[in-house]
Image (spheres, rainbow, N blue to C red):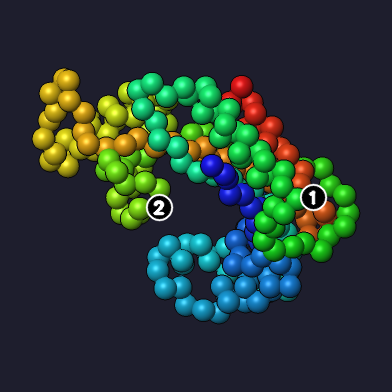
Amino acid sequence: MAARAQIDHEWMARGATPPDNPPVVGLEATSRAQAPQALRRLRTETPRSEFAMIMASPAWRIPEGAEVYCYRLHAQVITDEAPVGPTTDLDALDAAQAAQAIAALSDPGLIIIGDHPGTRPAAIELDMCLARPQWCSRPAGVGPDGPTDRLIPLAAPWIATYQEALDYYIDELAIPMGEPRWEDDEEPDITIWRCLAAQARTALIDEDAHIDPADLARALAREITAITT
């Protein structure tokens, strides 16, 4: 088993006024060089959907020539899924998946998407940092390499055991979808799977400031350690 990790640069533009609540718009840009053109597209191209219009609207509130660019770092890591049954040692699985995630975040070859030109040292400030198991079900005999349309996320945040995952599948998904009820000694013909997913994101960083992506990776690794020990 292994884990996949990467850190993205997410560039944004914001206005200078009003100073207490400047408009901020996310850009389809991973570098400072791409940011002006991405902002120009938002200002000039007709949004193709209501959602796109909502996302682009801050760009129209920033006076042209008065924009200020900034970025944030966004780290994500997810482990391979492991099958879970009624006798699975979840503490051992926590430890194994945490080790996989931390190893991926500590890898010198960690994927960094985008860049920033700033060199002024800045203290890291997080606006989000979380790690938690993610549960799903598949038909028996279908593994993670099988068709993705056979995967059913079990998204209830309170699921912590195999039985809770199974009960959620039966009560909230299978029965409402019209599947027959099972007898008390029967179980649906599925396999429960679990992985560990974690992400952390910095607060906005001025374009001339520098935060090492490795610092964000270490912060996320600490969060993973905290929730699995």
Query: Which residue does the numbered mark 1 point to in the structure image?
Result: 212
Q: Choose top left, top right, bottom left or bottom right for residue 62.
A: bottom right
Up the image or down, 66 lies above or below 154; here it is below
Task: Inspect the image, locate mark 1, and give the three-letter code of the amino acid beneath it.
Answer: Asp
Residue 9 relative to residue 187: left or right: right
Up the image or down, 37 lies above or below 138; here it is below
Residue 164 in picture, x, y percent from top left = 34, 25
Distance between the alpha carbons at the discs numbered 1 and 2:
35 Å
Task: Inspect the image, locate mark 2, and give the three-letter code of the amino acid beneath it.
Answer: Asp
Residue 90 relative to residue 222: left or right: left
Element at label 2: loop
How crowded is the residue under tag 1: few (<14 C-alpha within 10 Å), some, or many (20+)?
few
Q: Can residue 20 be seen in the rendering of this structure?
A: no
Closer to us: 213 or 209: 213
Residue 109's disc is: none
Residue 222 relative to residue 88: left or right: right
Residue in the image at 63% along x and 72% along y: 39
Residue 224 in picture, x, y percent from top left = 62, 32
Residue in the image at 48% along x and 34% along y: 133
Query: Which residue does the numbered mark 2 point to in the structure image?
Result: 145
The quadrant in which the N terminus is found is top right
Name the mark nearer the viewer: 1 or 2.
Answer: 2
